[in-house]
Amino acid sequence: MNDWKVEITFQFPENAAMRVSTQELLQAAYGQYALGAFNVCNLEQVHGLFRGATEARAPVIVQFTRVMRDYAHPLMLEHLLCGAEMIYPGVTFAVHHDHGDEASCADAIASGHYSSVMIDASHLPFEQNVAATQRVVEMTHRRGIAVEAELGQLKGVEDEMSVEAKGALLTDPAQAEEFVQRTGCDSLAVAIGTSHGAYKFTGSQRLHLDVLAEIKRRLTGFPLVLHGGSAVPSEEIERIREAGGRLDSSASGVSEEELKQAIALSVAKVNIATDGRLIWTRVHREFFRDQPGEFDFMHPGRIYMNEFADFVAKKCKLLGATGKVSCHGNVATRVNHTTNGRPSATSARPSASSALKLKRRGRQGLRKGRRGFSSASR
């Protein structure tokens, strides 16, 4: 009974979306614009992201975190992307595992669905962070997969902190240079004052662009990553509050001007998650407040898809990525995904017979039981 096999084959049409390597996108963007790296975890967000990228004609990075993969199941997320590839022809994108540990990175690598992974060992002492990153780099580079690492702590900097305390959270430029040289990572997420979530800054604190400039000086030509890149618009916060939400009005994010300066200082990838969640919260709160007799979630879902698409298109324009899809139209490789853990390079535009074959043996890899997903599926 445990030997049965399910094989699912997708035939990609000639005009299917282009799934390419993350490193290829970063190299093309460096010093000119930044890639929007959007965290998504459901159907509405995937539709919105690909619609927005289509409108902007901008390359994007689709990101799934460990939490998202556990929430939706890795296969469900991959099949959403397979559908998006066929529904939205012309979109150039890469797939990235965001904020992974060594185990989740290994699983993402083995799946064959990712062109890059992030090993987040920034909470560890420097030497342990180096060692963990080296181990992941060893796993990925032989398979043609890129590695993003993180140095420094994305907890935000407060006005009342001492200079020493602030320095302990920010990325040390000299350590960044040593870290990249020793680990061989392909991009580095740096801590320059922002944080995850809706409360990125307190008081008068903003991005420490002086730290970023020194890192650029030491790592010329090396792509840097800005985590916590959401804008957290005050109007979104106020509308959520007016619709019954309890977000504090002090919530704030990264300004447009700061993003432009960061791009000029080697930031080639900007992670965006909170803004998408704020739009979802506002749309659903307002819809059910104004129509309390409704219970069909597809109505606000349609609104959200359109609004998220508009947000993605505008964010890509702000990052300078609008119209840059043509830069990748003749790329040399396209990621071909299989579950044997060895993504291969094929021609840039595959023939109609190109297929994605997903094989899973046994019931554990396809079903969620009472004890949760099998370890092999995470």
Image (cartoon, rainbow, N blue to C red):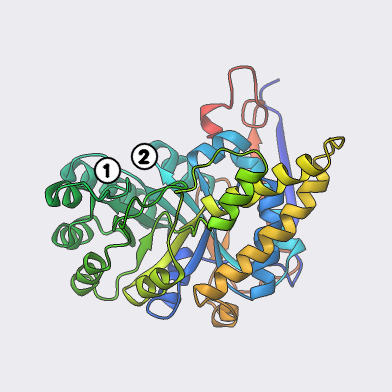
Image position of 238 (left or right of 286): left
286 vs 192, nearest the viewer: 286
Say few, some or many: other residues with alpha carbon within 10 Å of mark 1 (under 14 / 14 to 19 / 20 or more). Answer: some
Residue 253 visible at all? yes
- Residue displayed at 31% across by 51% down: 138
Type of the residue with mark 2? Glu
Q: Which residue is tagged 1?
A: 132
- Residue displayed at 78% across by 40% down: 288
Type of the residue with mark 1? Ala
146 vs 194, nearest the viewer: 194
Residue 78 visible at all? no
Name the quadrant of the N terminus: top right
In which image quadrant can residue 269 be found? bottom left
Cβ atoms under marks 2 and 1 closer than 8 Å? yes
Secondary structure type for disc 2: helix
Vertically, is 74 above or below 84?
A: above
204 vs 100, nearest the viewer: 204
Image position of 6 (left or right of 177): right
Vertically, is 319 above or below 306?
A: below
Image position of 271 (left or right of 120): right
In which image quadrant can residue 52 be found? bottom right
Question: How far apart are the two marked residues, 2 and 1, measured between alpha carbons?
Answer: 7 Å
Residue 195 placed where, x, y %?
A: 37, 50
Residue 156 placed where, x, y %?
A: 32, 49
- Residue displayed at 38% across by 60% down: 226
Residue 199 placed where, x, y %?
A: 42, 47
Q: Which residue is tagged 2?
A: 102
